[in-house]
Amino acid sequence: MSATTETATLGGGCFWCLEAVFKDLRGVSWVMSGYAAGHVQNPTYEQVCGGRTGHAEVVQVKYDPNQLSYADLLRVFFAIHDPTTKDRQGNDIGPQYRSIILTHSDEQRATAEAVMREIADAKIWPGKLVTEIEPLTVFYEAEPYHHDYFARNPFTGYCQVVVAPKVAKFRKQFTDKLKRHAAE
């Protein structure tokens, strides 16, 4: 990774969806699924899915700000999940699926607040945005079987019904921001 790499941590439903989208985004060098914003140390997937650890399923994204701004990364984030449903994305229900931006600096917080105002003012979504913004305290990497899940399991039912349509929507809407291989 270059010296100009920055990190973003975002939660917007199932981390398999977010990971699959962000891996195709030009300027992104690394994406990892994990858990954040909870109160249990080293949580497992099963614990987080139980909804009592306080964690959200998130992705941590390493990107080059010379190729992709944090604001543009957030615009993609707001386009690929519904930021108006509390603790829910489609049929995935529970606090682990909440919309959340975990900031790494005061500058990221200010940018996140500005982009949220932009999205709300544009009335892209019919309801009020419920996305939480809070500082990242700790990120726990998800178990290895979650890494590159969509790439390794594209024909599973969940991937076909939920992940693939989100990836297709993203690729159609953000053609100009795709890595070369993703556009082909």
Image: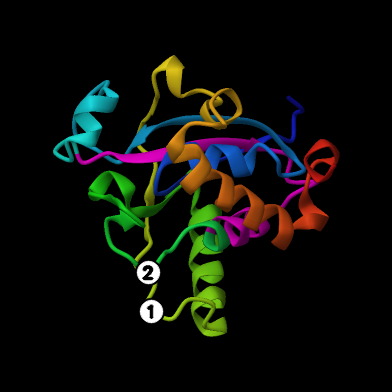
- Can the viewer see residue 51? yes
Residue at 43% across / 63% down in the picture?
A: 82
- The disc labelled 1 sits on which kind of residue? Gly
* Labels 2 and 1 touching (C-beta < 8 A): yes
Q: Is residue 139 magenta?
A: no
Residue 15 quadrant: top left
Residue at 39% across / 53% down in the picture?
A: 100
Over which residues does the magenta segment extend?
54-77
Residue at 62% across / 42% down in the picture?
A: 22
Which badge, 2 or 1, is on the more N-terminal residue?
2
Q: Is residue 15 above or below residue 77?
A: above
* In-front residue for pair 165/143: 165
Q: Report the side of 27 relative to 104 (left or right).
A: right
Q: What secondary structure is found at the residue carrying circle 2?
A: loop
- Quadrant assignment for the C terminus: top right
Q: Is residue 55 magenta?
A: yes
Q: Which residue is mark 1?
A: 127
Q: What secondary structure is found at the residue carrying circle 1?
A: loop
Residue 53 drawn at (x, y percent): 18, 35
Residue 23 drawn at (x, y percent): 65, 36
Residue 45 quadrant: top left
- Quadrant assignment for the N terminus: top right
Q: Is residue 119 above or below residue 74?
A: below
Residue at 71% across / 44% down in the picture?
A: 25
